[in-house]
Image: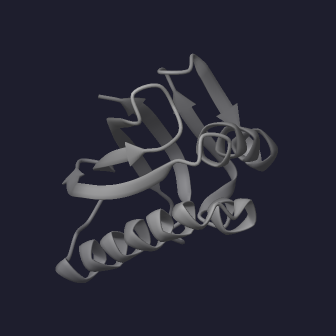
Amino acid sequence: MPSTTQDLTLERDTINKWIAATNTHDTAAYLDFFSSDGVLDDPSVGHIYNGPSEIADYFESYFIGYNTRTRLVSIEPHAGYLHVEVDFTGDFPGGQTGGIFDITLDEDQKFQRVRADLT
């Protein structure tokens, strides 16, 4: 994980751009952040999504389908991954909830593995 301040700045910039892309509800822009063999594991929906096609299904169902907007709360570097805390609002029951993403980046700053959950 981040070995220098420059690395951490780049990773934070990547996360901020990803959240901005998420809020456009543009599936292609969202998928651009994932590696070609990326995995998204979301225990809150009980499914692991493998590769671009399945990750696109997840995004279209839970972000576009519920008109979800994501606000960054915090980013914390951990050994081997970034812990990202967010706030979601949208057209889902309750209209607001917290969430987390534990994101493992590859050497190209692409998302190799994302564990998503609601808080």
* Quadrant housing residue 36: bottom right
Can you give x and y, in whole percent of width and height, for residue 8 in the image?
A: 25, 72
| Residue 42 in the image: above or below residue 89 | above
Number of callouts? 0
| Residue 20 in the image: above or below residue 90 | below
- Which is more toward the observer, 105 or 52? 52
Can you give x and y, in whole percent of width and height, for residue 23 in the image?
A: 53, 62
Q: Residue at x 65, y 45 (%)?
A: 59
Residue that sits furthest to the right in the current view? 53
Task: Point out the image quarter for the N terminus.
Answer: bottom left
Task: Point out the image quarter for the C terminus.
Answer: top left
- Which is more toward the observer, 91 or 87? 91
* Quadrant housing residue 14: bottom left
| Residue 26 in the image: above or below residue 92 | below
Q: Is residue 38 left or right of residue 85?
A: right
Q: Residue at x 52, y 47 (%)?
A: 68
Q: Is residue 21 left or right of residue 61?
A: left
Q: Residue at x 62, y 26 (%)?
A: 48
Residue that sits furthest to the bottom in the current view? 6
| Residue 38 in the image: above or below residue 34 | above
